[in-house]
């Protein structure tokens, strides 16, 4: 892979995470447990999709051939999406949604912080913008973890189940292939190993406050970064892309 | 032949832009909000540089359309609107007079300098936010996410009014 092609793939990995999680969260719009929380989830979804948009604009410019951000979002098929498995997992109960959010927000906060130092100026500038929003996201989901874990026996049980079910997707967040490690060496990509200890210590701190234990002995799953997804992504894309595919090139 | 309107001074363009209200907070202009970062003539083309407030803010498209319309009204047809991410937009750019306009409008203006606020990853409590209605500082945060991306929802414990707080970013 030449360096432009690997930069393009790297941007897609970052953007796809934001987009797919943003879309998942947007499915909650009007279904929040109460009005303020509904608004919070919609706001966060909007931030995530907005950050993805900035990245896709950049990726489309690299790809050239008059491609636009819409081509990347609406006209790629499942195997071309490079998001991690965590973000595509379907909404179940609120504890699960917040747990998924908390795991991603924690990763994303430290990731964006490190990406601000990228030698790629556009990526660094977008990260500097995104980190301000990520901070609000992380505070929001972290507070919910504490509130649910430290709440009723029912909320505690649901959160515990959520952590048990989602923990298998944590390791994939930090996986890097050869092309990405090449970008790390050039100072463009984030060395995910360097943010792992910050990730672990924030997760541990919040979980301890919430009276939660970190699940042990979980077999780790991965594949998303290579385009091998769980069955849930296809359904998400079918819905997200349906209008654009039914009316190709439609504008409004 | 129509003379190209290159004669319009950059300061005149700033004045035009300063007349365009924020689509969601009409008491302040796009210039006061800090969205407009630069105005310059490049040969015969006017280039306007803007920066997004929030990456997903739906008002950004609206702002671009409003700028487009205002310039056309002045007969300026050859222009380009560039989006710039660096330096990232911050509420620290708001002047005191802009903040007081927000307050009069019923939105509590951003309180602290963002550097003091943004790092906190656990605690929720923002710095003291005076109620824009009765000035009491006995106020409570309801949600950090409010009616638009840039606002939190708060409540005054004294006059019991709920109000928007323009959050620090």
Image (cartoon, rainbow, N blue to C red):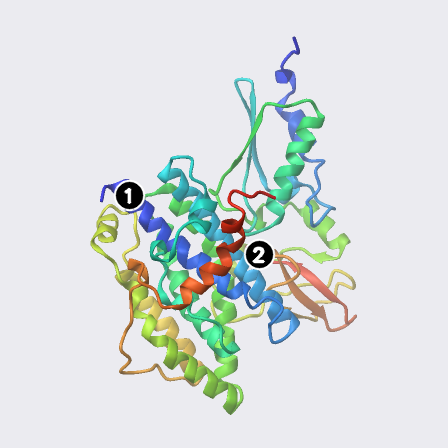
**Residue B140 percent coordinates (x, y):** 66, 71
Q: Nearer the viewer, residue B95 or A78?
A: A78
Report the side of B160 relative to B5 (left or right). Answer: right
Q: Which residue is mark 2?
A: B168
In the rendered image, the quadrant that contains the C terminus of chain A is top right
Mark nearer the viewer, 1 or 2: 1
In the rendered structure, are the residues bearing label 1 and label 2 in contact, judged by CB atoms less than 8 Å apart?
Answer: no
Q: Quadrant of the N terminus of chain A?
A: top left
Please report, as a chain letter, where disc 2 is located. Answer: B
What chain does mark 1 sit on? A
When asked about the image quadrant of residue B126, the answer is bottom right
Q: Residue at x 22, y 53 (%)?
A: A181
- Image quarter for residue B136? bottom right
Name the residue carrying label 1. Answer: A5
Residue A56: image x %, image y %? 43, 47
Residue A10, how many percent across, how many down? 32, 50
Left or right: where does residue A35 sit relative to residue B43? right
């Amino acid at each position: 892979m030449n360096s432009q092609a690997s930069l393009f793939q790297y941007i897609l990995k970052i953007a796809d995470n934001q987009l797919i999680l943003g879309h998942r969260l947007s499915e909650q719009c009007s279904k929040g447990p109460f009005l303020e929380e509904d608004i919070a989830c919609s706001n966060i979804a909007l931030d995530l999709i907005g950050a993805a948009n900035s990245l896709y604009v950049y990726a489309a410019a690299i790809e050239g051939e008059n491609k636009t951000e819409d081509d990347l979002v609406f006209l790629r098929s499942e195997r071309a999406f490079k998001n991690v498995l965590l973000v595509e997992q379907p909404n179940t109960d609120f504890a699960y949604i917040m747990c998924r959010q908390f795991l991603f927000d924690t990763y994303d906060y430290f990731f964006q912080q490190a990406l601000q130092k990228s030698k790629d100026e556009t990526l660094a500038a977008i990260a500097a913008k995104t980190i301000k929003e990520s901070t609000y996201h992380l505070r929001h989901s972290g507070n919910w973890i504490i509130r649910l874990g430290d709440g009723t026996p029912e909320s505690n049980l649901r959160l515990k189940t959520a952590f048990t079910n989602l923990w298998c997707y944590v390791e994939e967040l930090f996986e890097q292939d050869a092309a990405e490690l090449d970008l790390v060496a050039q100072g463009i990509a984030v060395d995910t190993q360097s943010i792992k200890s910050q990730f672990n210590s924030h997760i541990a701190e919040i979980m301890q406050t919430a009276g939660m234990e970190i699940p042990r002995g979980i077999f780790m799953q991965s594949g998303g970064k290579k385009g091998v997804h769980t069955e849930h992504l296809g359904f998400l894309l079918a819905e997200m892309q349906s209008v654009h595919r039914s009316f190709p090139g439609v504008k409004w | 032949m129509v003379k190209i309107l290159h004669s319009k001074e950059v300061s005149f363009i700033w004045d035009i832009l300063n007349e365009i209200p924020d689509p969601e907070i009409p008491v302040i202009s796009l210039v006061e909000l800090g969205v407009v970062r630069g105005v310059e003539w490049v040969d015969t083309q006017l280039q306007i540089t803007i920066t997004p407030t929030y990456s997903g803010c739906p008002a950004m498209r609206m702002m671009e359309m409003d700028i487009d319309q205002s310039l056309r009204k002045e007969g300026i047809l050859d222009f380009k609107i560039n989006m710039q991410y660096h330096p990232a937009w911050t509420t620290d750019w708001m002047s005191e007079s802009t903040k007081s306009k927000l307050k009069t409008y019923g939105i509590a203006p951003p309180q602290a300098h963002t550097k003091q606020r943004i790092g906190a990853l656990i605690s929720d409590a923002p710095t003291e936010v005076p109620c824009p209605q009765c000035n009491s500082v006995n106020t409570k945060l309801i949600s950090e996410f409010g009616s638009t991306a840039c606002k939190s929802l708060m409540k005054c414990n004294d006059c019991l009014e709920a109000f928007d707080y323009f959050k620090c970013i």
